[in-house]
Each structure stands twice: as C-alpha cells, then as structure tokens.
Image (spheres, rainbow, N blue to C red):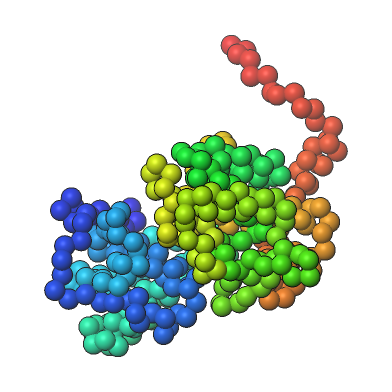
Amino acid sequence: MNKLSKRRPPPSSLVLAPSDLTFNLAAVLPGRASSRHSQRAYYRWIERYLVEMAALKRPKSMPREVLMSALPVEPLLGSMTAPTLRAWLGNLAREGHGRQGVNQARASIVTLAGLLAESELLPDYVSAAMGNVRPPNAEDGQRPGRWLSIDELRSLIGAARQIATSPTMELRNNVVATMLCTMALRREELSNARWGDLSRQNNRAVMRVHGKGRKVAMIDVPRPVLNALTSWRGILETSNVRLAPETPLVRRIWKGGRISKFGLTPDGVWWVVGDAAAAAGIGHVAPHDLRRSVAGALQESGVPIEKISRLLRHSNVAVTERYLSKLPQANEGAILMSDVLGLDDDPFDFRDES
C-alpha cells in the first residue's frame, strides 16, 4: 500500500512546548488573504497540516488564532518541503476531498511557505519548489452536502433547543438554528453579526449581513427570527449583559448558563448545528447544509431564482444557477423504467430450495 499513513503525535507532543522562535502568521496573512473567511479557511488547513505532517497539536484551551500568532518555527520548517506537501495533498484526494478543497489546502501551505521565505526563515528555493507542487486529481467541485427536507429542518430547530443545558443556552440555540434555517446565513456571517446590524427600514425589520469578500447586504428578518431575538435579548438584559451596537448578536454560554462577553465562534455555530442534528436523528449536518437546504426548498416551492439569489447574496443570478445545479437533482429514470417493466414492489423471496 502506497498510502502515506498519518503521523500521530507522540504523547509528549500533545501540548506545544515553548519555542525560542515563533512565526506570527496572523499578522502577515492579511497581506495575502484579506478576507476573514479565507483567513479562517487557511488557518484550518495549516493546523491540519501541522498535526498530520509535523506532529503538532493545539491544546483545546488554546484558540486557533493564538496558535497562528505564535507558530513554533523549528518543527514548522521541518515539514515545509515539496515531497511532504505532495504526499499530504495526495492523502486529501484519497480521502475524498473535492478539487476545490484540495486546491485551497495547497494554496494555504504554499502561501505559508512564501511568507516564511519573505521573513528569511525558509530558503527561497524551498518555497519555489513547494509552489511548483501541482494538486493531485480530485473530483470536481465540493464534496456532496446534505439537502434537508422541511420536516428535517423543523426537527433540527426543535432539537437545538432540546440539547441546551440551561435556559440561556436554549434561547441562544433557538436564535442560531432559526436564523440559519430561514435566512441562509453562513456560519461566519452569523458569528460576525452585531446588534447594531439590526434596524428597521421602510417599516421592515432588516439585518446587515457581512458576507464573503467584504460584501455587505441587507436582508429582511422574518417574524420567527424577531421573536427568537426578542426572547434572547430579554434574558441578556436581565443578566446585565452589555448590549451596545458593536456587541455580538449571539454569544458563548459558560457552564451553568452564564453568558460570556465573547461572541459565538464559527466553530461554535458548527457544534450547535452538529449536536442538534445528532439529537434529531438526522445524521451529520453542517451549517452550510442549512443554507443549501433553504435554497433548495425555495426552488422547489417555485420561488423565482432572482429572489433566491438576493437571499444568498450572490453577485449575480448565474452564480445562483450554478449553486442550485450542484444540489442533488431528482433523477427518476430508473423508477420510471421499473414502472414500464411492470415490476411490483414485493421483495424477492429468498427461500432455501435445497
């Protein structure tokens, strides 16, 4: 078997040891990737690369951004070679990652190598060699996601409340699930939302959404979301939580139900959705699956594509058409053919004729 086995960190390396020399990727990456969405994606791929190819693992108590602001240089440089990158990308392709994901993974490590070279920590020829590594063949597009039915979306919203361990968490989770299942927000957009983004325009409740590539859009807020936000705001006020326009719309909840001053992170949104889906018995669901499901439900209901495009905040309708085309489309040819053949629905009788 040629498959490169992942390097598991030995017990002694589960916690990063202090290093005399560190590299502040968080400070220099914005010069290469200005979008916060891209920066978070690069951080995730770089952390995975360090875990699998440099035997480094971030302690659970350490936020990912903290690790990226102090990357230990010695073990990092040991993994920055073209053969190592090529082997890692091959692993990703074999695991089923789509072409888009593999390309993004490659871009994150090549960018890191370039920034290390600019800082004179990595030889230029090593950075150039890593830049020449071509991504392996992978399936087009992203991995297929889930397209939830209306009943599954309702179940997930209910389960998000049920998994809460305190009244404050129940209200917070209700806000998260209701907004994702109606407003088609990305998890980063919900995490970045502030109370000041809510307003009333022309007698309509609207919210300013900070999307990818620094795009900003205004979308209507449905009544169920307003009701959820009203209940959530009420418990924030009774808990003496500061509610200035610049404060986060949704927040972390500590054990015992105490509300944090910090906002819920994109990873926190991921865990709320994943835990709710598991509790609802509908399998693995990611936050973007809810955005996908909203678009698919609207399309099936006959909503014009222009309105769907405005909700998804795409740059033009052509982008929305490509987005919808990636949804699992009905392909009933085999079912129709079974009807033509007159096959019944009775299962085959596997009787022992010996």
Which quarter of the image is occupied by the C terminus? top right
Is 1 in front, or is 325?
Answer: 325
Q: Tell whether 66 sits left or right of 184.
A: left
Vertical comparison of 183 with 283: above or below: below
Question: In the image, what residue occupies the spot 25% across and 53% down?
Answer: 8
Q: Tell whether 323 sits left or right of 337.
A: left
Question: In the image, what residue occupies the spot 50% across and 77% down?
Answer: 35
Is 284 in front, or is 185?
Answer: 185
**Residue 326 falls in image quadrant:** bottom right
Total marks placed: 0
Is 120 in front, or is 1?
Answer: 120
Is 17 in front, or is 131?
Answer: 17
Whether residue 122 is visible: yes
Question: In the image, what residue occupies the spot 69% across and 23% down?
Answer: 348
Q: Position of residue 40 (x, y in %)?
A: 44, 68
Vertical comparison of 308 with 252: above or below: below
Q: Tell whether 155 sits left or right of 58.
A: right
Question: In the image, what residue occupies the spot 30% across and 73% down?
Answer: 69
Q: Position of residue 123 (x, y in %)?
A: 24, 85
Q: Position of residue 58 (x, y in %)?
A: 28, 59
Whether residue 274 is visible: no
Q: Position of residue 310 (x, y in %)?
A: 73, 69
